[in-house]
Image (cartoon, rainbow, N blue to C red):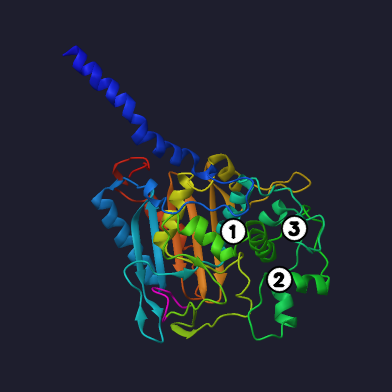
Amino acid sequence: MTAFFRDISRFLISIRHIFFLPVLLLIGNFHQALDKHDADWKHEPDFAFLYEPVVNFNPDYIEFMEREIDHILRRRGFNGSVMVAHQGKAVYNKSRGYSHRRAGIQFRESDNVFQLASVGKQFTAIATLMLYESGLVDLDDPVRYHIDGFPYDDITIRHLLNHTSGLQNYMYLFDNFWREERLPNFDDMLEMMVQRKLPLNFTPGRRFSYSNTGYAFLAMLIEKVSGDTFAGFLSQNIFEPMGMKNSFAFEPSVNISYEQTRGLAAGHEHNGRLSRVIPVDHVDGITGDKGIFSSTEDLLKWDNALEMNLLISEETLQMAFQRGRLRSGFAINYGFGFRLQRQGNDDIAYHNGWWRGFRTTYVRLPENTLIVILNNTNASINGLDRQIQNIMNRSPYSRFLNMEELIASN
């Protein structure tokens, strides 16, 4: 009998590597599964199976959250989607109102797609860090190393990431000098900057000044370094591997009308009620600073992927959550694609967005808590995330029956 158990033990030891080693390698090295010498590298698809949150919420807590959040959304006349998640799982995820008022299209129960506006800057930043982690760029490289003809010698990738470049707003140029019927692209933006010889607002690194131009140039840099379009890079290396089936970056050549794109919300003006649908803007062809579309469900997958380090390592991710520093050494309240704010004893990472009928908020709180607010009107959502935090803080119920970490699951 002893020999029998010894043989069984040896057999189990011999086969454990067959089952477990590949999974461990995938989890531990996914963010490093890049050819550091080949600009044509791609992530392998279908890695979404690697994470599955296991959280059991107290039913009384769920009921409390639904009742209280529903109440404030009705009171504010909110039109859009709101999600609150703990430990990778949504405790509240609802949409209310119309995705397209004039056509009488109400929101579906889930998977409603919104323009993220500046909330999308985090995707541009993480994509840049993926190139950095692959060895294709260094954050202190001058941008001109990677974008031929870039006219500012002293601006680095890091300056673009934390808004310390001093670049002027590219939208001013297109508002005043663009005369073509088509939507402009990155090359048009670069040519316009070169032709008009816009001076910098300040010496790079000397000040913080929020810059959409910087993030548009980051998207252009991603194209130049990867050899793919910005939209294609995000799709191939983030959206598809993470199972984010309702996320994409705008491309002028692709029709994203609400009639042909499943679940797409139209941006509206809001004057007491939804009115005019806001059309595509003349600078929508420039992305990276805006132009990324997603849903609350997909943004939760994205946040889980960051927590699990499925895209980049923990060390690299923490760079995005560290305050940038000016040449003087002064710390700014911005990392890479995230605003940073001290709340109690913790730093929280967040971002707000506004663009052409969409207002958005994305807040990462302690204890792996996430708040996402996607609104397809120009009505203010200021303070709504704080109201939701207040609801959580005054809940008389425990958030969980069982507090369990995110686990890898096949």
* Mark 3, secondary structure of its residue: loop
**Residue that carries the numbered disc 3 in the rendered image:** 165
Residue located at (46% from left, 80% from top): 257
Quarter of the picture containing the N terminus is top left
Q: Of helix, strand and loop, which mostly describes the magenta segment?
A: loop
> At which x and y percent is residue 405?
37, 40
Q: Amino acid at mark 2?
A: Asp
Q: Which mark is residue 154?
A: none
* Mark 2, secondary structure of its residue: helix
Determine crowd level at label 2: few under 14, some 14-19, many 20+ residues with C-alpha closer than 10 A.
few
Q: Which mark is residue 187?
A: 2
> At which x and y percent is residue 267?
49, 77
Q: Which mark is residue 124?
A: 1
Q: Which residues are magenta?
A: 259-266
User: Does residue 322 appear in the picture of this structure?
Assistant: no
Residue located at (52% from left, 82% from top): 278
> At which x and y percent is residue 179?
71, 86
Tell me which label, 1 or 3, sits earlier in the chain.
1
Tell me which label, 1 or 2, sits earlier in the chain.
1
Q: Is residue 163 left or right of residue 115?
A: right
Task: Determine whether 53 is above or below 275 in the image.
Answer: above
Please identify the quarter of the rendering in which residue 207 is found: bottom right
Q: Is residue 139 left or right of residue 249?
A: right
User: Does the residue at mark 2 contact the one at mark 3 (Cβ under 8 Å)?
Assistant: no
Query: What whole-number distance in Å separates the C-alpha atoms at marks 1 and 3?
Result: 16 Å
User: Does residue 276 appear in the picture of this structure?
Assistant: yes
Task: Determine whether 140 is above or below 280 in the image.
Answer: above
